Amino acid sequence: MANLALFGGAPVRTKPFMGWPYSDEKEVEAVSEVIRSGKWYRYDGGKVIEFEKAFAEAQGVSYAIAVTNGTTALEVPLAILGVGPGDEVVVPSYTFIATASAVLMHGAAPVFADVQPDTYNMDPAAFEAAVTERTKAVVPVHFAGMPADMDEITAIAKKHNIRVLEDAAHAHGGAYKGRMMGSLGDAAGFSFQASKNITAGEGGAITTGDAELAERMFSRHTFGRMPGRPWYEHHVVGTNARMTEMQAAILLVQLGRMKKHAEERLTNAAILDKAIGAYTEELMAMRPLNAGTARRAYHLYMFKYLGGGRLDGVSREDFAKALRAEGVPASTGYDMPLYRQAMFENAPRGVKQTSDYNKTYQPNVEKAVKESLWFGQSVLVGDDSQVNDIAAAIDKVVSNADELKNNK
């Protein structure tokens, strides 16, 4: 008789995991208040401005500009940092497509840097090796909420006169050596898309400590207007990337829960780290830099599939499939390095490509896409019942790995 649910055994968990986005009547009332007011637009109401001030304070910066989404939160700063045709921007090869597509949207070329094996974040040495006379900016990503090695990255950037834009889409409430992620470069882009740790379904924010950059990025996001100037004066090339009052109202409520949920994620992630640490040949938890001072935001809980010991002969994909059958939402994440996406061979007209992406091979990211496993951040929210079930499911699959081998 089978033990694993994949082959007919009883699953560890039948109760659904916590749904996301999380909301309650506070979000309903906040949106209702805006609807009843009739002030749905940044320039009529005050919710967007209130959120910008609150988010800037939460992230330890002087300025925040609320925008339409996390992709816009990268595109707007890149423009103001002077990125354009013929320029290169260094990005990590393990990240979501928007980190690099934002570069292409300005006619510039993304140049990929390999990642560190313990964090899957940009390797500073690989960044420096990628620098050329064309390099205008670097976009380090705090992937999964794990802080990138910002001391090294910013030092290299300063040496080469390169601007630093943090991709902080996963980094809400996280810190690096006592400083909040999103406060470490020239500017940073955050996302409030539906899966993110605080969300309005869509939305984003740009943060910076530089008053001049803040003013110019604000202008870029609202048709080139400048605060205090006549309405029909337009000072920089701009667009409409403004957040709505309803989105901001939701985000103000979400921001009020951010600290509580962040603490729960840290507590529950430690339980998973301990559980996974029991399988030294089979699995490995991620190893953050500066573990004593880093505060991970945990947009994802990531770990590595080593495939040794009792899992020898079992593929990562079969292991993840077995976990899902036990009721645990395991993902294998990205199935290729970013530089293998067809987009980079079919780049928009006018983009001057400076890399032969077909010939790119970076060993750490090539390994990462074959060994990574993910759980979404919502499994870490609440009490420990969800992560205890995950730990039990992992133990069950490892302990019954022979069933996976015998049922190929």
Image (tube, rainbow, N blue to C red):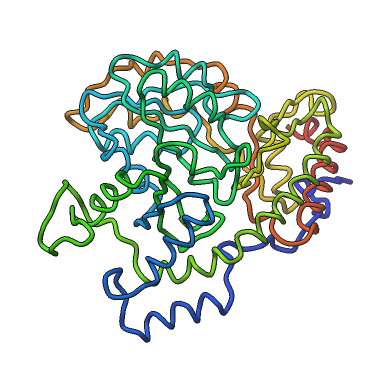
Disc tally is 0
From the top left corner, tell me how far across and down residue 360 is, in percent: 42, 16
Q: Quadrant for residue 289, please give it.
A: top right
Q: Is residue 211 left or right of residue 116?
A: left
Which residue is situated farthest in the left direction here?
A: 232
Quadrant holding the C terminus:
top right
Q: Quadrant for residue 331, please give it.
A: top right
What's the residue at 55%, 51% (across, down)?
172
From the top left corner, tell me how far across and down residue 139 is, in percent: 42, 32
What's the residue at 72%, 62% (across, down)?
382
What's the residue at 87%, 37% (across, down)?
399
* As drawn, 326 above or below 382: above
Residue situated in front as seen by the camera: 230 or 266: 230
From the top left corner, tell me how far across and down residue 259 is, in percent: 64, 59
Q: Is residue 280 left or right of residue 19?
A: right
What's the residue at 42%, 59% (across, down)?
202
Residue situated in front as seen by the camera: 351 or 167: 167
From the top left corner, tell me how far across and down residue 337 is, in percent: 48, 27
* As drawn, 220 above or below 370: below
Which residue is situated farthest in the bottom direction here?
A: 36
Q: Is residue 51 left or right of residue 25?
A: left
Residue situated in front as seen by the camera: 336 or 97: 97
